[in-house]
Amino acid sequence: MQSDGDGKEDLDRLSDMPNFVLLHIMKFMSMKQAVQTCVLSSRWKELWKHLTDLALNSSDFTNLTHFSKFVSWVMSNRDSSISLHSLDLRRKGCIDHELLDRIMEYAVSHDVQQLTIEVNLSVIVGFRLHHSVFSCKSLTYLKLSIWAVPWMTQLPSSLQLPALKSLHLEHVTFTASESDCAEPFSNCHMLDTLVLDRFNLHQGVKFLCICNSNLSSLSIGSTIQEAPYKFVLSTPNLRYLSVMRDPLHQLSACKLCFLEQVSIDCEAYFHTHFERTYSALINLLQVLADHVKIMILSSSTLKILHGLSTFGSMITQIPCFVQLKSLKLKLKSPTNIYDEGVSTIVEYLLQKSPFAKVDVINC
C-alpha cells in the first residue's frame, strides 16, 4: 500500500496488476489459498476460476471428507471453457474411486497437458482407471502413483498418448492383449523419459517389452512379484539408464549405440534368491558392456559384485567395458575405496576396463 503527497486514497499495487500477472502469482499458491483470494475484493471474486494449474493436496485440510468436497466444488465452479495446463492431485489416505474417476475425466475433457496423481485407492473388484486418460491427445507429462488395495492399478495393453514426452508409473500392472508379451509404450511416439517402479505383470504375461524408438532416458525400480520374467529393450536411441533395487532378470536388448550413462543401485537379499540376484546383475552388465561410457555403481551394488568372489565361475563373467570412460562409485560413509571388498572389485573392474577413470562420490 502506498499514499501520494496529495492525500489520494492508498493504491493497492497488487490489484493494479493485469489478470495474467495475478494468475501467475496464484500458481504458486495451494488451490485452497487461491480460492480464498475471492474474499479480497469484487475483482478477485472470479479470478481463481481462470486458473490453468490446479494443485489439489489433502494436507491443506483437516480431514479427507472436507478435501473431497472441496475438490468436487472446484471442478463444478471453475470456468469450464478454459483448458488445463496441469492438474496435481495428492492425497494421504484412500480416495473414493468415483471421485478419482471424475477428476481424471475432468482433466482429460479440459485438454490437460501435465497430470500428476499420487493417491491411495480402495478399489472394488474389476475397477480400472478411466480409460480416456490412456488415450489423451493433449498429455505431455503423466505421473501415476496409485497404491490400490488389495489390487494394483491395471493398465490397458497399449497406451495411446501421441504427445506424451515424460511418463512415470508406480504400482501398476502391465497387461497383454493376446500374447504373453506386454508392450505398452510402442504407440507413444514422442516419449523421451520413462520411469517405472514397483510394477508387475498380469497373470500369464511373461515378457515386458519396452519398444520405443524415441526414448532417451529410462529408470527402472523393483517389481512386485516373485517369479522372474523376461525384460526386452528395443530402444535404439536410449542414452541414460538407471536400475534401482532389483537387477533386471533375463534382460535382452537391441544395440544401444547411443548409450552414455548407466546407474546401478541394486540391493542384495542374501537370505533368499541370492544366486539369481548375482546372475541377473552379471547378465545386465554383459548386455551393457559394449556401449556404456559412464557407469555409476552404488556401495550395495559393489557388495553384490564382491559376493561373486564366493562363486568363482561367476566373477570371471564380468565383461570388459570397452568404451567405458568413467567409473563412479557412490559410497556410504565410512565406506571408502580401500575397504576390503570394495578395492578388490574395483581392481577387477579396472582390469576389465583399462581406460576408465575412477571417481568416488560420498553420500
Image: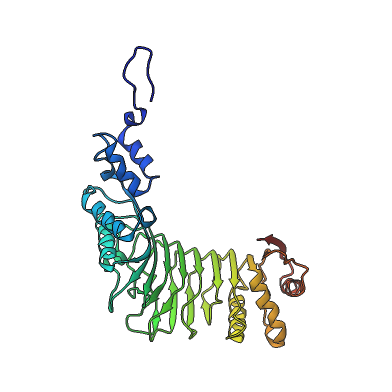
Left/right placement of residue 134 relative to residue 289 reads: left
Left/right placement of residue 25 relative to residue 127 reads: right
The way the protein has been coloured in the rendering is rainbow
Residue 101 position, x and y percent, is: 27, 65
Residue 111 picture quarter: bottom left
Observer-nearest of 308 and 29: 29
Observer-nearest of 346 and 216: 346
Q: Quadrant of the C terminus?
A: bottom right
- Please report the residue visible at 69 percent of the width from the left and 87 percent of the height from the top: 311
Residue 310 position, x and y percent, is: 71, 85
Q: Quadrant of the N terminus?
A: top left
Is any part of residue 7 visible from this angle? Answer: yes
> Is residue 328 positioned above or below 198 on the image?
above
Left/right placement of residue 212 relative to residue 348 reads: left
Is any part of residue 319 visible from this angle? Answer: no
Residue 89 picture quarter: bottom left
Residue 277 picture quarter: bottom right
- Please report the residue visible at 33 percent of the width from the left and 40 percent of the height from the top: 23
Residue 126 position, x and y percent, is: 27, 78
- Please report the residue visible at 70 percent of the width from the left and 87 percent of the height from the top: 313
